[in-house]
């Protein structure tokens, strides 16, 4: 999930420089969708261990991605 998220983020940031607004918007929607999917998966995996709401799971997914990023 994290690899897919990074791939679409790379595509999104490249599109900002070179693509039409429609392409940028499509990539942004895909990026947000993967982010939501990752945070939902995280909530499912933490169920019974940690109680989280969707916003907290989204922030936690962002933190995990930031810690995993090698830039």
Image: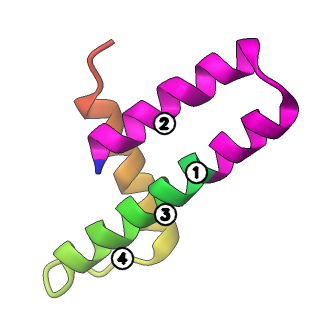
Which of discs 3 and 1 lies nearer the camera? The answer is: 1
Separation of residues labelled 1 and 2 (CA atoms)? 7 Å
Write down the residue under mark 1.
30
For mark 4, give the secondary structure. Answer: loop
SS under mark 2: helix
Disc 4 designates what residue? Answer: 52
Q: Secondary structure at mark 1?
A: helix
Residue 38 place in picture, x, y as percent: 36, 60
The residue carrying pointer 4 sits among few (fewer than 14), some (14 to 19) or many (20 or more) residues within 10 Å by Cα, namely: some
Protein image colouring? rainbow
x, y percent for residue 19: 77, 21
Answer with the quarter of the image where residue 64 lies: top left
C-alpha span from label 2 to label 4: 26 Å
- Tell me what residue is drawn at x 60 percent, y 30 percent: 12
Q: Residue at x 47, y 54 (%)?
A: 35
Pair 1/4: label in front = 1
In front: label 2 or label 4: 2
Mark 2 touches mark 4? (CB < 8 Å)? no
* Rendered view: 65 above or below 54: above
Asked whether the residues under the numbered discs 1 and 2 touch, taking CB atoms below 8 Å apart as contact, a structural biologist would say: yes
Q: CA distance from mark 3 to mark 2?
A: 13 Å
Residue identifier under label 2: 8
The local crowd at label 2, few if under 14, some if 14 to 19, many if 20 or more residues have their Cα within 10 Å, is: some
Is tag 2's residue or tag 4's residue first in the polypeptide sequence?
2
State which region is magenta: 2-29
Q: Is residue 14 magenta?
A: yes
Residue linked to disc 3: 36
How packed mark 3 is, by other alpha carbons closer than 10 Å (few <14, some 14-19, many 20 or more), is some
Please state which of the two labelled residues, at mark 3 or mark 2, is closer to the viewer.
2
């Amino acid at each position: 999930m994290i690899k897919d998220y990074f791939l679409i983020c790379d595509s999104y940031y490249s599109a900002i420089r070179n693509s039409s607004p429609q392409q940028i918007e499509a990539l942004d929607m895909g990026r947000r969708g993967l982010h939501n999917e990752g945070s939902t998966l995280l909530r499912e995996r933490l169920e019974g261990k940690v109680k989280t709401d969707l916003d907290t799971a989204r922030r936690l997914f962002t933190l995990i991605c930031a810690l995993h990023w090698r830039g």
